[in-house]
Amino acid sequence: MAAQFGRRLRRGATTTAVAAAAVAALSASQAPAVPQPDSAGDHTAAGTVPAGDGAATGNSPYYTDLPPLNTPNKPGTSVNLPVTGSAEAGIPASILAAYKKAEQDVAGTDAACRLPWQLLAAIGKVESGQARGGKVDANGTTFSPILGPALNGQGFALIKDTDGGAYDGDATHDRAVGPMQFIPSTWATWGQDGNGDGRKDPNNIYDAALAAGRYLCAGTRDLSLAADLDRAVLSYNHSTEYLRTVRSWFDFYNRGTHEVPDGTGVLPVGTDSGNTTPSPSPSPGSTTPSPDPKPSNPGGSATPTPDPTPTPPATPKPPTTEPTPSPSPSQTFGSLENAGTGVLSATAGDAFAERVTVRARNLLGASLAGTSVTFTVVGDTDTRFAGGKSTVTLRTGANGTVTAPVLTAGEKPGTFRVTAVAGTTVPRALSFSAKVVARVADTVTRTDDKVLTAAPGAEFADRVEVRTTYKGTGVADTAVTATMITDAETPAENDKGPYFKDANGEPVRTLELKTGDDGLLTLPEIFADTTEGTFTLRLTTASGATLAVELKVEAAEA
């Protein structure tokens, strides 16, 4: 069951000293900028607070607990971690490994950003309490999805659904997802495969940490500079309180941390140990902190100001309904792809040799079995699937693939499409171009076997009738060339023997003709000159079909 949570209030007055100390370190902060992929720099105007969906988390709620006043303060750098320390300084092993790996991966592609893993740890602490205290499996994936409240505009930003509920299980509004709390639209752009398993899963700490690192390094930021670091954090959540909280943990982790076993990390106040019950969502007018309003000095630097006297935390109300379980990314349809469909082309009346084959994948990129896929013949065509159907629905097999039934070409030549559609909330579709070509005669034959004879200077008594066919079916409008030839080995036009007559009654020995309905063709009358002997009439089509007809010219017996 997915854990959901609302905003957490800052703990009592003992934390205000840390907050006040953080203010001085933030005095050089500039206005936030919304990072874009491969952007040249930050473009948000000074003093502007962008809309909620411009931030990585959509300005979702976050844990506002601050680190203890007694920080680790270990001599030297925090890269060499102490083996003991305060409970708050402990970071679960898999979570810590993911942060450090993300730092190394980003350094390999964007060394100028100088991303410190402690910044990822600070954000991970604020966003999800280090993946709920390190409750992840051996691959770094949370045992159940971590979901923020619905961003429905009621106490939070208003962000309507962008993923059909694929990542967050909510088809009406978006929710922040995973240990680094990305909203689905941001994950669609910035999602990464941090553990090399071929999947981009916001619920995997390796994937989420690398995505957060690249997001923070967007543009030309150098996170060793305080102003750029502030911009990066504010791009994650547009709130100066959020910036102060992250900065406090960043400073805390820079003083020293240590590794603890997965699942034993300290959870922020207000969460349950099992992470199955949602914390109450705030309502308008509650004491829940909200993103900072527009600064009063537009055009100048956005310098954070100290918090006023903290309000005692509100008493959480127990949930009245059981939260709806979120769909597992491994069981949720994510994409549809061509699985090797070849060229779709067939002659009229023939079955297509190729069949449309597609593969369904889940949100993690793995093959997804049992997904319904609807195949449809679209366009001005009489081509149909087996059984005369134009639409069929089938389910993918164990390997995530499904193949459409055999297509049989109709009589109408031309192009059309075959579509494959899967998914209900946000359907994914593929379109395949297909073509039916007209029949081309592969055979030309006589319709009878009469012997064709004539006396010298006379007309042949019987007319020659032929039929052009394709696989036994007559092919109309087939061009046929009829030529009186010398012989089969040297098929030149003969200058003597039988002949046709043109429109002027003059002898011709070559004619261009065309078959009629059902491929039938009756040749014009044939005449004999005074030369006796056996002659050959050759009939050929453009496709290469050939027929030789024997003509005899001989005097009648006395």
Image: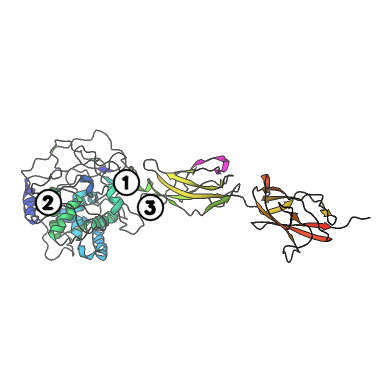
Q: Residue 121 in the image: x percent, y percent?
A: 20, 56
Q: CA distance from mark 3 to mark 1?
A: 13 Å
Query: Which one is nearer the viewer's eye here, 12 or 440?
Result: 440
Q: Residue at x 43, y 44 (%)?
A: 421
Q: Which residue is disc 2 drawn over?
A: 244
Q: Residue 66 in the image: x percent, y percent?
A: 12, 50
Q: Amino acid at mark 2?
A: Arg
- Residue 91 in view in this figure: yes
Q: Quadrant of the C terminus?
A: bottom right
Q: Amino acid at mark 1?
A: Tyr
**Residues rendered magenta in the picture:** 377-392
Tell me which label, 3 or 1, sits earlier in the chain.
1
Q: Which residue is disc 3 drawn over?
A: 365
Q: Which residue is disc 1 drawn over?
A: 167
Label 2: state its secondary structure. Answer: helix
- Residue 85 in view in this figure: no
Q: Residue 520 in the image: x percent, y percent?
A: 70, 47
